Amino acid sequence: MKLAGKVAVIIGGSQGIGESIAKRLASDGANVAVVASANIEKAQAVVANIEAGGGRAFAECADVTDADAVAAMAHRVVDKHRAIDILVNCAGVFFPTPVGGTSTAQVDRMVDINLKGSFYAVCAVAPHMKASGRGKIVSVSSCAGMIGMANYALYCATKSGIIMMTRSLAVELAPHGINVNAIAPGNTATPMNEDIRTKPEFAGFLEAMAARTPSGRTYSAPEDMAGLVAFLVSDEARAMHGTTVLMDEGFTAGI
């Protein structure tokens, strides 16, 4: 229960890696705000699961592309629970953006959710953390922020942007007692990539990824990522500022 008494906000906590993070931090004693983008019932389902296991959690909803909505959510949490000690930015989308075949709406959606949404969340929460003189912020980048992927230029760019944003925010916020770090997952089994893992038409792509994954685990479990986040938001990581931790089964280590 090393997070007992802490209030954690998990944006994108209603499924995938975010859901696993919410469950893990609750098991470590935090009171967790599970934030869905639009469907609060999805957040409520995660909350019910956490409470059934003896944890504490509550459902929230905020569209990360709307800075005012994210700020309002942060104010609601502070009003009800007196503080935000932990912020995890886990909202994201993943889809191809090939040159010449990507609409402006798709460009905006990718950048607005993956990059601007994380910045809006930090802008909403950091003032409350500054007021208390402490805080932990973790954003979710990707191994795709460190290597190039054909047809996924914008996804790679947004995840690379998270890495540099993390470094810059750490320099800005560390003097206020706030740790800002990121994780860079590799292929992780979530609803976002279920089609790639299960549909016959993606068999060739899946085989190619398996061939370049040294560990033999083509897809990590989301619980693996949750364990890393649990470390980063604990006092054991108090010396870490501006770091992005790669956790990708060796996918980007070499050819």
Image (cartoon, rainbow, N blue to C red):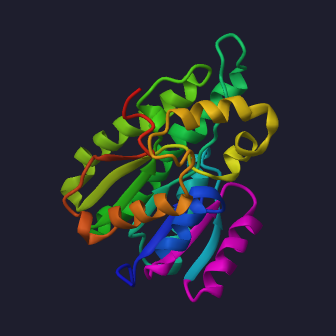
Residue 83 higher or lower than 100, as above or below:
below
Give me the residue at 34% from left, 65% from top.
Answer: 231
Residue extending farthest right: 200
Looking at the picture, how far across and down is residue 203, in whole percent?
73, 34
Residue in the foreground of this view, choosing between 253 and 16:
253
**Looking at the image, is 175 positioned above or below residue 193?**
below
Counting from the top left corner in percent of width and height, residue 96 is at: 67, 27
Question: Taking 241 as reference, is 22 left or right?
Answer: right
Q: In the rendered image, which quarter contains the N terminus?
A: bottom left
Q: Which residues are magenta?
A: 26-55
Residue nearer the viewer, 195 or 55: 195
Determine whether 57 is above or below 201 in the image.
Answer: below
User: In percent of the image, x 44 and y 50: which residue is there?
Assistant: 139
Camera sees residue 72: no
Would you say residue 16 is visible in this rendering?
yes
Q: Is residue 234 left or right of residue 148?
A: left
Residue 108 image offset from top left, x and y in percent:
64, 29
Q: In the image, is 53 to the left or to the right of 45?
A: left
Outermost bottom residue? 54
Residue at x 72%, y 73% (from the top left corner): 45
* Residue under the point 47% across and 57% down: 225
* Picture layout, residue 30 above or below residue 126: below
Quarter of the image for the C terminus: give it.
top left
Name the spot of residue 30 as percent of width and height, x first: 45, 78
The quarter of the picture where residue 110 lies is top right
Q: Is residue 34 magenta?
A: yes
